Image (cartoon, rainbow, N blue to C red):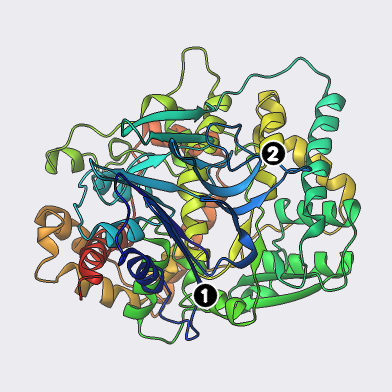
Amino acid sequence: MAKILYACSRRPFDADTTARLASVCKALKPDNLKTDLQTTVRCDGGVAYACTDASDALNERGLSVLLGALYEKDACSWEVPESPLPDGSYALFRTSPDMAEAATDPAGSRTIWYFMDEEQFVASTSQRAIVMFLGSFEFDANVIPWMLSTGSLGPERSWDRRLRRIQPACSVILDRASWRLRDGARTPVVFEPADLTKAAYAASISAALDETIGTMRSLDWSDWVLPLSGGYDSRGILCLLKHRIGIPPEFRTITWGLEASLHQRGNDARVARDVARAVGVRHEYLTTDLSQEPVQDILSRFIACAEGRTDHLAGYADGMDIWRRLHDDRIRGIIRGDEGFGWVEVTSELGTRLSVEGALCSDFENLKHVPELLGLPPQEYPPFLRRSPGESLESWRDKLYHAYRIPTVLAALSDAKLSYVEQITPLLARRILEVIRRLPDGLRTEKNLYKEVVRRIGPSVPYATRGANADPRDILESPRVTDVIRSGLNDADARSILPPEIIQQALGGIAPASAGDTRAALAKRVKRAIAQRLPRFAKDLMRATVVKPTVGGNTLAFRAYVIIRMARLLADDSHRLRV
């Protein structure tokens, strides 16, 4: 696991700071890890930082620290404040006698939040860590609409109203003498197609992929695994590794999902196994069936590890046991296939927002009343995410993907895994993102150009047509799960966090699984199958002309449950170091 907290004070930190930082790191350890974790703590005058179990992912130069990996051929001066931000997957904190700077990587793959008052500047990849260090918590009700409509915290918000988020490829700089904070590096997400032939575009993306993968040659492959799916992204990494540096003998891949998925034709699980065999690498399948642990423990662990940033429970319903096993097996990290090559075909602005999991409460028939009920202004995108005049729907779609979905949705899923292992996301390297943002819309839609590149270098194994994990609705309709959610929503103090109207709506929408009712279960399967096969333009047309979409009752109830549980967890965190 590797999460980091960095602090800069106007006065030298006291003698207790080292112990406080170590306690913060200890409190972030997942409850299913039994072994002690190594913690790095540094405290020198008015600068201090602490990192949990980072090992070789922690790069230190003086009092500057980089957590993650770099995709640079040559050594760079990453430690110097205001120097160009390097290419890589990282969270970066740079210190000099005059300045302190916190910076995100080109994709924002590791989110950084920060706090500042008259005495201290505190930044971290963990909101919980900041709250513990400060010893106080101030709940931000502005996250409620975003969590209910998207299952995430939205593009800018934190659970604590005092915390701010640094956007991708950006930094904030503290002038230590005047104690003023200003914006540092800023790289806006802009799609501006170049005037090239398709062959030239393909050559540029192939060169960027080769160059990035080539920088991974020095990894100790006995410490790293590649999660392999049946799609294009991880298959592309595997084939590029084989093409660029060769497959080391100790290299291995893993896939996870339901036990039954391994036996289904066209399933991610089965296709990934076939790809591994075709390429000639070791492969292991890990199951994510709902754990037999108490559901309360499963949900609490998931919420704590992801810090309530996502409602994507299905892949973690095993109680995070996959990640515990990898940690116990001394796996240092995973190489993820997160990417931004282009998103699905869209035909409307509403369909675009829904496609990136960025829809607003006003987009849903059963949520349009939420902001007003909370006494908040209408929910809307910040200026940097809004569609610009003349911007094509496809360019706006991919801007939302790069500037919202990657640093908000995908980074939240990374947060859960980073509680156990490190992570590298080479397909999000800056040199690759820069090429993608110069492609015309047609070569980005459905990742068309990238798919062509992968098909040329990959084995002739068909691509998956089905996912390996459980349908999230099946998990949330399980009686074991609904009982816990219902109990949580009925807790005596739940109404101090959410208005009673929202709690009652959430409780009233909880529907039990229909597994015992053969006709109901069959009808549900048929309805889902039809929805999956409808062309996207037909779905968008129905949403625009027939009826607004709605957030499913069980999904809404789980999102409300996450809000309640996370508010309580952070309130507990604020007192944790006082005990």
Nearest the camera: 447 or 405?
405
Q: Amino acid at mark 2?
A: Lys
Give me the C-alpha separation between circle 2 and circle 1: 41 Å
Observer-side mark, 2 or 1, equals 1
Residue located farthest toward the top when viewing the structure as drawn: 390
Label 2 sits on a secondary structure element that is helix
Q: Secondary structure at mark 1?
A: loop
In the figure, residue 569 lies in which quadrant? bottom left
Does residue 242 appear to the left or right of 541 in the view shown? right
The answer, for residue 34, to whether it is visible in the render is yes
Q: x and y percent of residue 88 in the render?
A: 65, 45
Looking at the rendering, in which quadrant would you find the C terminus?
bottom left
Residue tagged 1? 38
In this rendered view, identify the residue nearer to me: 284 or 425: 425
Side of 149 relative to 463 (left or right): left
Label 2 crowd bin: few (<14), some (14–19), many (20+), radius 10 Å: many
Q: Position of residue 202 (x, y in %)?
A: 83, 32
Tell me which amino acid carries mark 1.
Answer: Gln
Residue 366 image position (x, y, % from top left): 25, 46
Residue at point 39%, 59% (across, down): 311
Q: Residue at x 57, y 49 (%)?
A: 90
Task: Name the residue at 28% across, 62% down.
Answer: 132
Above or below, 230 against 96 in this view is: below
Residue, disc 2: 447
Relative horizontal placement of residue 328, taking residue 317 as reference (left or right): right
Q: Is residue 396 left or right of residue 165?
A: right
Q: Position of residue 293 (x, y in %)?
A: 41, 86
Q: Earlier in the sequence, mark 2 or mark 1?
A: 1
* Labels 2 and 1 touching (C-beta < 8 A): no
In the depicted view, which residue is nearer to us: 78 or 301? 78
Looking at the image, residue 369 lies above or below residue 159: above
* Disc ID at residue 127: none
